[in-house]
Image: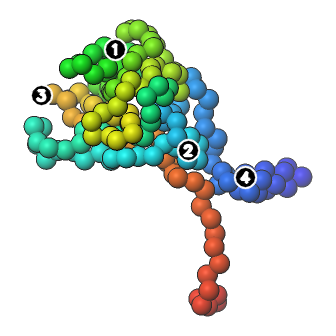
């Protein structure tokens, strides 16, 4: 009987499109979250520009990810942590969240809704998107990840913070294969 219930539960999960994977953790459970909501599955926003690390510390590149979002959009903590900076840098609102030893997330352009020193859970609102960036027509959030190492900071891909089930654009679909012989 228990085996039948287990199989039924797995099949129900597959039919629901979860692929049998664990469901997203609730905000505050130590999980992860997209920093802005989008129209995709599980609130996945459109990625306008990917992380392109510079060849040198001073070279050209894109030291983060741009996510489509308009002014006034809620900005959430992608991981649990502590707000270590909330203010203006060169006239642009910036919020920095320390998420672990030597790891910091940055968000811009953001008007912070939490003060420096605040502890926040993954998924908790930390700010509001404040206007746009010149390189993002229609508005976007620039989301960065920095790691402190001896000699300075290294930029990392912030998408690496998110588990695969959040990053995937949607459930896999099995399609018929025509013209291929069935395996023996």
Residue of label 2: 39
Q: CA distance from mark 4 to mark 2?
A: 19 Å
Q: Is residue 174 visible?
A: yes
Mark identifier at residue 160: none
What is the quadrant of residue 63 in the picture?
Answer: top left
Badge 1: how crowded within 10 Å, few (<14), some, or many (20+)?
many
Q: Residue at x 57, y 54 (%)?
A: 170
Q: Which mark is residue 151?
A: 3
Between residue 183 and residue 26, name the one nearer to us.
Answer: 26
Left or right for 5, reference 146: right
Pinpoint residue 7: horizontal percent, then vertical percent: 79, 56
Choose mark 2 or mark 3, whichever is in front.
2
Residue designated by label 4: 16
Reading the image, the residue beneath label 1 is 86
So how many labels did they put on this image?
A: 4
Q: Are marks 4 and 2 in contact (CB under 8 Å)?
A: no
Front: mark 3 or 4: 4
Between the residue at mark 3 and the residue at mark 1, the CA separation in whole angstroms equals: 25 Å
Q: Earlier in the sequence, mark 2 or mark 3?
A: 2
Q: Which label sits in the foreground, 1 or 2?
A: 2
Secondary structure of the residue carrying tag 3 is loop
């Amino acid at each position: 009987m228990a085996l039948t219930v287990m199989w039924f539960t797995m099949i129900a999960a597959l039919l629901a499109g979860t692929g049998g994977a664990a469901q997203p953790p609730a905000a505050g459970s130590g999980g992860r979250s997209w920093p802005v909501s989008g129209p995709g599955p599980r609130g996945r926003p459109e990625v306008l520009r990917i992380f392109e690390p510079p060849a040198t510390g001073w070279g050209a590149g894109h030291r983060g990810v741009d996510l489509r979002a308009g002014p006034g959009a809620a900005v959430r903590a992608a991981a649990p942590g502590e707000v270590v900076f909330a203010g203006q840098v060169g006239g642009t609102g910036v919020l920095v969240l320390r998420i672990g030893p030597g790891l910091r997330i940055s968000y811009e352009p953001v008007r912070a809704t939490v003060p420096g020193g605040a502890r926040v859970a993954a998924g908790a609102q930390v700010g509001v998107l404040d206007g746009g960036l010149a390189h993002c027509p229609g508005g976007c959030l620039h989301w960065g990840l920095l790691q402190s190492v001896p000699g300075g900071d290294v930029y990392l891909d912030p998408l690496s913070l998110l588990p695969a089930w959040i990053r995937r654009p949607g459930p896999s679909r099995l399609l018929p294969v025509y013209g291929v012989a069935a395996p023996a």
